[in-house]
Image (cartoon, rainbow, N blue to C red):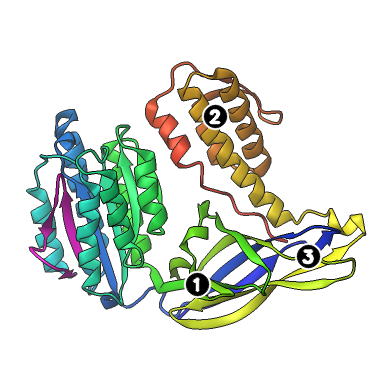
Amino acid sequence: MSDFVAEVFQNEFLPVGAETVDAIVTVRSSGGATGAAPAADVVQMIIIDTSGSMTEEGGRKMRAARDATQAAIDTIRDGAHFAVVGGNGGAYMIYPHEGLAVSDARTRQEAKDRVDRVEAKGGTAIGTWLQAAAYLAGLRPEAIAHAILLTDGKNQHEESWVLDKSIAACVGLFQCDARGLGADWEIEELRKVASALLGTVDIIPRPEDMAAEFTKLTQAAMGREVGSVELRLWTPKGSEIEYVKQVAPTLEDLTGSAKPQNPLTNDYPLGAWSGEEERDYHVRINIPVGGVGDERLAARVMLVVDGVDQPAALVRAVWTDDERLSTRINREVAHYTGQAELADAIHDGLAARDTGDQATATVKLGRAVQIAHEAGHEDTVRLLQKVVEVDDAATGTVRLKRDVDRTDEMALDVRSTRTVRVKKG
């Protein structure tokens, strides 16, 4: 079993009259004995879009989806439970006929043979696909369950409330990494799925990129060792948590996922973890105002790992009239505040570009280039360069490009929430 530790980074000194405390909580797992959970405790589900749109491009998309699914199947460890689900206007089992199969050489080959015969037809109803995955995950409620969901289109054949209800029914049963193929899917739909189910969302621009992505996602799932980690925050009476956000490796608002344990304590699910992993969280707490020299405990930070409490770290507040102390910005807080601003600047810039507001788009995307450059976020700089001509990255001086490939624009949007970690020490 991995060891978990939580470490708090903050400037505990507040100016007179301040009532907000910011802290970055770094959660780290290390020392896993096996590097992965026993295979019998893992469930891997692969949900592939088999709607009629997958026959486009001369069937190239469907052929690539079959290849990618077969590559993922080959990555599933012996003893793990798995299933392949087809999705169109409904959901159906590709392999096995019902329930979950136990992975071995025979079942993996049977599954690949079945996948080879899958044909594309019908509509798109993602909520129904998720309901099927929820049923399968529910067959082994103690396992670490993970799903890959692939679609190339919008959720056109069910009401939006059906998708919302289906997502809610999946929370806590499995994690889901959602992938959109090409440029005809809806980013916010898949982002909603991945966000609620503690997974990731990304674009697969070309069909030939799919197999490598499926393999990578399945390998990561096979390496998970701890099925449930929660961030437990206790705040004293009179204090209130304003928000809890994951800030690395991606930006994710966890505030709405709070599970109250008592009037002063909330748990925030962090999902499954591998044996060696590190993530950062930004916690903001509103507290009663104190006087100069007053000291207050703003929050106690604990971890709950597979139901077992772990040692605590503390978030403190000390009021001072010494500006040298109170105006010092903690480098971790400053770094991740900038990363959130970067994501907002990209989102606002692309939205302005879509509406024809070139002036706003130029300012926002220029600011995004500047922040990414300052943070050393080279991947984001490269994505931005496909949308704007960069004259001076340091000042954020850019010009909008006229002809931008839609998949490049979507890649910038969907990957805007990826962050670079602050350099420690």
Q: In the picture shown, does residue 69 fall above or below 391?
A: below
Q: Are marks 1 and 2 in contact (CB under 8 Å)?
A: no
Q: Are marks 2 and 3 in contact (CB under 8 Å)?
A: no
Which residue is drawn at the image coordinates 38% and 31% (left, top)? 407
Which residue is drawn at the image coordinates 27% and 56% (left, top)? 166
What's the mark number on residue 28? Answer: none
Taking the magenta stretch, the answer to whether it contains residue 258 is no
Q: Residues within 10 Å of mark 3 (few under 14, many from 20)?
A: many
Q: What SS does tag 2 mark?
A: helix
Q: What SS does tag 3 mark?
A: loop
What x and y, as percent, mark residue 391? 64, 21
Q: Which residues are magenta?
A: 82-102
- For badge 1, the amino acid type reads Pro
What x and y, as percent, mark residue 418? 51, 47
The residue singled out by tag 3 in the image is 12
The residue singled out by tag 2 in the image is 349
In the rendered structure, the answer to whether residue 415 lies left or right of residue 243 reads: left
Looking at the rendered image, the disc whose residue lies closer to the viewer, 1 or 2, is 1
Which residue is drawn at the image coordinates 19% and 59% (left, top)? 132
- For badge 2, the amino acid type reads Gly
Q: Which quarter shows the N terminus?
A: bottom left
Q: Residues within 10 Å of mark 1 (few under 14, many from 20)?
A: few
**Label 1 to label 2: alpha-carbon separation:** 37 Å
The residue singled out by tag 1 in the image is 260
**Label 1 to label 3: alpha-carbon separation:** 26 Å
